[in-house]
Image (cartoon, grey):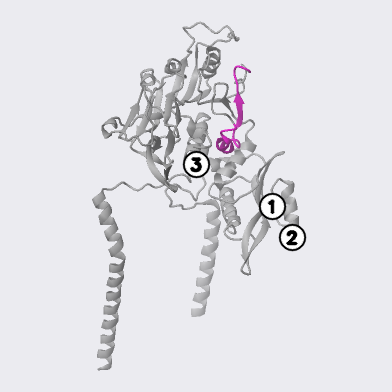
Amino acid sequence: MEKLNNTTKIILVFVIVVLINLISLYLFTRLDLTADRRFSISSYSKELVRNLDDKFTIKCYFSNDIPYPYNNIRRDVKDKLEEFKAYASRYFQFEFVKAEDEENLALDARNFGIPEIQLNTIENDQIQIKKVVMGMVFMYEDKSEVLPIVQDTKNLEYEIASKMNKLIKVALPTVAFLQGHDEILFPDKMQTIQQMLQANYNLKPVNLKEDPKGLDDTEILVIAGPKTLIPDDEKYLIDQFIMDGNKVMFLIDNIQADINTAHATFYENDMNDWFKHYGFEIKRNLVFDIKSSSIQVRQQYQGGYSISYIQYPFILDLVNLNRENIIVKDLKSVMMAFASSVDTDIGMDDSLDVTWLARTSERCGTQVGTLNINLQYKIPMNQYNRSHLPVAAILIGKYNSYFADKTLPDTIDTSGFMKSGASSRILAVGNASFVQDDFANQNNATFFANAVDWMAQEKGLIEIRSKNIAARQLKEVSDGSKGTIKFIAVLLPPILVILIGVLFWRIKKARYARIQRYMGV
C-alpha cells in the first residue's frame, strides 16, 4: 500500500508538471525587476513582431570558438531573439547558421556582407590572433539588412528593432539638413548623427538656393547652426514647409568663440523677427552656469608643461532635463558649448503647446554685448544671478504664415501660397555644436536622435534607444554628511566582522558547555 501511495504521488507530480507547462504556453510572462526594464523588450518591439504579416527571418552567423570576452555574445543574442520570439506571430523566425567547418561558415557569411574580424586570444601562454564571424542578416520579402559585427549586446534590441522597422516600412521618412548659410556640414561634420539615424530615415543635405523643390519629399528639416542670414525666398519655402504640417528643428549658434585666443563675438545671424512668429526667440546672449563641464588646460613652465582640468562655465553640463518628456527623460545630461537661452513666452501667449526640454541650474548668468571667455577670467559670484534658463524647447500647434501680411518673394513660384497650415512641430535650441562630431557624445547624439524620432512620432524607437542611457544619479549631500558617510564606510565593515566573530564564538562556547553537561564533565 505504501508503494502504491508513492507511485501515485510520482504520477501526480508528473501530471502537475505537464499541466503547468501546458498552461505556460498560453499564459506567458517574464519578470524583470530593473528600473528601466533593460532585460525586457519594449512594447514597440512586441508590436513589431506581433503584427508581422509575412515571413521575417534572422540568420545569425557566429563562430564556434569565439575568445573571451566575446564568447558570451552568442548566448546573449539567442536570449534576446527568444524574447522577441515569445511575443511574435508565426511569421517571425531565427536560426544560428551551422556549417561543416569555420571556413564554410565564413564564406557563407561573407556572401551576405558579414566580414571576418580578428580577435586576440591567449593559448598556451601566447597571444594568438583568431578570425571569427559575429554578424546577423535580416530578411523580409525580397529585402535584406545586415548587422555585420555584433561586439556589444547592450543596444541589441534597438539594432534588431531598427532593422525590422526599416524592412517592414513601405517608405522611410526623409530628414533634410539645410546647407548654404555656413551651417554644420552634413554628413561631413555629423558622422555620429548619420550613423544613428540612417537605419530608420532617409537623410540628405538640401540647398534651397540651388534646389527650391528640395523639401518636396521631406518630413523633417534640420537647420543646424547657420552663421549667416537665411534670405526671404528660402524663409518662404521653409515657412510653407511648416504650413504643410511638416517639422523643423532650429538649432542656432549665436556665438563665434575660440578658447585658445579667448576671442568671442556674435554671428551676424539674428533672425529673431522670423523665429518670434513661430513662438520662440533665441536670445542674443552667452549663458554661463555654475554646473559646467571641465576642460583640459596645458600650462607652460620652464623646462616643460603640465596638464590640468578646470571647470569652464561656458560649456554647460545640463542635468536639469524635463523628465516628463520622452525625448530627455532617460538621459543623464546634455552638453552644450557657448549656448544661448531660448525664450518661449511668445509661444505660450499664442496658444501653442510649449514644453521646455533642457534648462540651466539654479545658479547661472548671461553675457551680452562684450563677451569674455578667457580661461583665467573668474566670473564674480554675484553675476550668477539667473536660474533655470531654458536652452531647448519644443512647440506644437497650428501656425499662420510668416508671409501672411508681407510681400511675397518674386524670385520663386508662390502660386500655391498657404496663409495658414496644419498642426506642426518645432524644436528650438540655443546651440548647434552638440550635433557636431567633436561634441556628439552618447548623450548629445541620443538627444538629437530622440528629437528626430519625436518629430516623426516614433516614440517606440526613443524608448528602446534610451533604455541603456539612463544612469542613477547620487543625491548631493553636504560636506558634513560626506565625512559621516566616509567614516561609516571605513569603520562599519571591520566592526561587523568583529561582531559576527564574537557571535560565532559565543555560540560555539555555549554548544561546548552543553556537551560537557551532557557528558557529566
**Residue at disc 3, secondary structure:** helix
Query: Which of the pair 484/53 is nearer the observer?
Result: 484
SS for dot 2? loop
Instruction: Give me the disc on residue 442.
Output: 3
Label 2 to label 1, Cα distance in Å? Answer: 14 Å
Nearer to us: label 2 or label 1: 1
Labels 3 and 2: the sequence-earlier one: 2
For residue 116, the mark is 1
Which comes sooner in the sequence, label 3 or label 1? 1
On the picture, is 51 further left or further right than 257?
Answer: right
Q: Amino acid at mark 2?
A: Asp
Disc 3 residue type (three-letter):
Gln
C-beta proximity under 8 Å, tags 3 and 1: no
Give the Cα distance between marks 3 and 1: 27 Å
Tell me which numbered mark, 2 or 1, is placed earlier along the sequence. Answer: 2
Occupied quadrant, residue 360: top left
